[in-house]
Every structure is written in C-alpha cells, then in structure tokens.
Image (cartoon, rainbow, N blue to C red):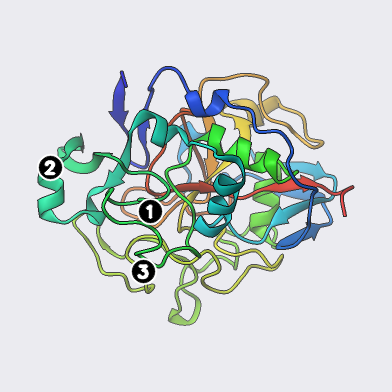
Amino acid sequence: MKNEKSSCCIPQASRGATPGAAVVIPLARAFSSEGMKLLAGGNFLMGSEGREIWPKDGEGPVRKVTLDQFWMDECVVTNGDFEAFVTATGYVTEAESFGWSFVHASQLDGGERGKRKAFRVQGLEWWYRVDGADWRHPITPGLSVHEMKRLDHPAVHLTWGDAENYARWCGKRLPTEAEWEFACRGGLEQKIYPWGDELTPGGKHRCNIWQGEFPKKDRGEDGYRGTAPARSFKPNGSGLYNMAGNVWEWVSDWFDPDYAKGGPRNNPPGPAHGEVRVMRGGSYLCHVSYCNRYRCSARTSNTPDTSSGHLGFRCAADGKFG
C-alpha cells in the first residue's frame, strides 16, 4: 500500500505485490457467445486529432487499422455475472486481498467521508480510501450489491488481474484496444461518440456521465448518480451498451502514448511491455469541464493493481469461436 496517489480521472494505487493477479484461474467452462455480438472486423480509422483530445494520451495520429472478426460482450460484466464466477471458483479479488479500494466523494455522505482517508486533487477531496470496499460492497462495507439491488449494474473495484482471471474462466479474453474502439464506433467512421457527434441528440441523454459542477454536485439529469444498469440507454450500431460513460473498461494493452505513431496496423496487440494498462470509455464521473474521455477515441491508463468504484470491464473472443 505504498506510493498511493491520485489523478484527475482515476486514483492510482501502486500497492506492490498483486495477490489477485498472481492467481491463475483455469478455463472452467466452454466458450458461449450468449450475450455477445460477432463483429465482422475490417478496416477502420482509429484515433483522433481533434481539438478535444488530450495530447499526453496518445490518441493520434488517425490511422487505418485492420481487424479480423471477433466477438464482443454486449455489456460490461455485471455483479450477477461476477458473483457466478466467485461462487464457482472461490476467487478473491485484489481489493478484497488488500482490504480496501477507492470510492469517489460523490458516493459517500458527509459522515462516511469523515471516517475515511481522503486524497486531494487540485485542492479538493475527490477520492477516499474505503476499507472493506470491493465488488460486493461498492460504496461501504455495510452495504452490499444485493441490498442495493445492483446485480444488473457493472461489477467494479476490479483490477486488471481480476478481469483477466474472469475472462479466462469464461473461455474469453480482454479485448485489444483496437477491438474496443472498433466496437465502440458501431460502424460510424470518425464520430466523436458511439451514436454520432452530438452529445445529447434531440436533447436526450445517451450515456451516464456527470451533469452539474464537478466534483461538487451531479444533477443526475441522465437518470443516474453513480453506476447505471449495464444495459442502460440505447445500444450503438453494433448492439453494444454503454460504450461511453458508466464505468471505465480495462483492455488487454499496455499503455504507451507513442505506440500509435509506429505500431502495427493489422490486429495491433499493443506494446510488448509497460507499467500501466489502457482503460477505455470514461465513466459516470466524466465531465467536459475536466475530463471528456467518454469519446470513442479517448484513452487513459492505470496501474494493473488499481481498483475503484468506477472501473470494470467487458470480454471479447476470437471470431473463430461459435
């Protein structure tokens, strides 16, 4: 639990050893394409060079990438999904092993915040270390996903290693970053969002992000303050839900801001090594005033052992299956 620090989007916890990631869960059940979409692959323009990008994130240059067909989960892994995995395997997540995880201030009332260790960002207390927070107890240890009726919400407080182990158990894998962006675009070329270039077409919300003054008050105009059910809002052109907002999603790639400049263009696997992993999609905490990373091309990163209340994943599989 050393070198704990925060960033504007995601808290970072370099906690040293990673007990959850060290566990290797073997394939336990045959691959099933239920709840997945088969995407044809092909050529698409990946990345962005628009004025809304964060240069340090390495979104550009825009480049033509070619992908083989692949399967992608229609939605992120839910608490109900993850509970089935834990029941079958006895798996213990890294947040449970370490005994704590990060919860955003907006999810805690004043009394709860007073009990926790705060992490300041830009002079404000945005993130709190909550002992006992984990996928079963996403806000406080005294409140479970069953009591909150959130079995259909994204499973959160999961590290990259936790995601890898779940995917392996299902006979799946994490998507590559290129696959994730292709899937997010839903057949639309170089659009900002999975549905087009307008954030709220016709005045209707299409994703779960922050409305109001961040980080003081979320007005919840999209219907949610915190996570939304995994199948909320209208799916994109590929039939996938919540590719923008709700929770950040781990992908398989190591992060390198310069990889796009000279990396492979045919089924790019990402860098061979690194210190942090890529995350995609943004979350319910994203707001245009400080972090507009709920765009199709947007990306950020974190240490593989980090867990928080707005970080989950979805799975993919090679197109040869099914």
Alpha-carbon span between mark 3 and mark 2: 25 Å
The x, y position of residue 259, in whole percent, is 63, 27
Is residue 175 among the parts visible in the rendering? no
Please, what secondary structure does the residue beneath circle 2 have?
Answer: helix
**Residue contact between numbered discs 1 and 2, judged by CB atoms under 8 Å:** no
The x, y position of residue 254, in whole percent, is 59, 27
Please, what secondary structure does the residue beneath circle 3 have?
Answer: loop
On screen, 228 above or below 176?
below
Alpha-carbon span between mark 3 and mark 1: 13 Å
Write the residue at 33% across / 33% down: 99
First in sequence, mark 1 or 2: give its number: 2
Quarter in which the C terminus is drawn = bottom right
**Residue on which disc 1 sits:** 286
Q: Foreground residue, 54 or 144? A: 144
Foreground label between 3 and 2 = 2
Foreground label between 3 and 1 = 3
Picture quadrant of residue 190: bottom right
**Residue on which disc 2 sits:** 115
Write the residue at 75% across / 34% down: 268
**Residue on which disc 3 sits:** 224
Q: Which disc, if any, is residue 140?
A: none
Picture quadrant of residue 274: top right
First in sequence, mark 3 or 2: give its number: 2
Furthest residue toward bottom = 202
The answer to whether residue 271 is left or right of residue 97 is: right
The amino acid at mark 1 is Cys
Q: Residues within 10 Å of mark 2 (few under 14, many from 20)?
A: few
The x, y position of residue 34, in whole percent, is 75, 62
The amino acid at mark 3 is Tyr
On screen, 164 above or below 210?
above
Please, what secondary structure does the residue beneath circle 1 have?
Answer: loop
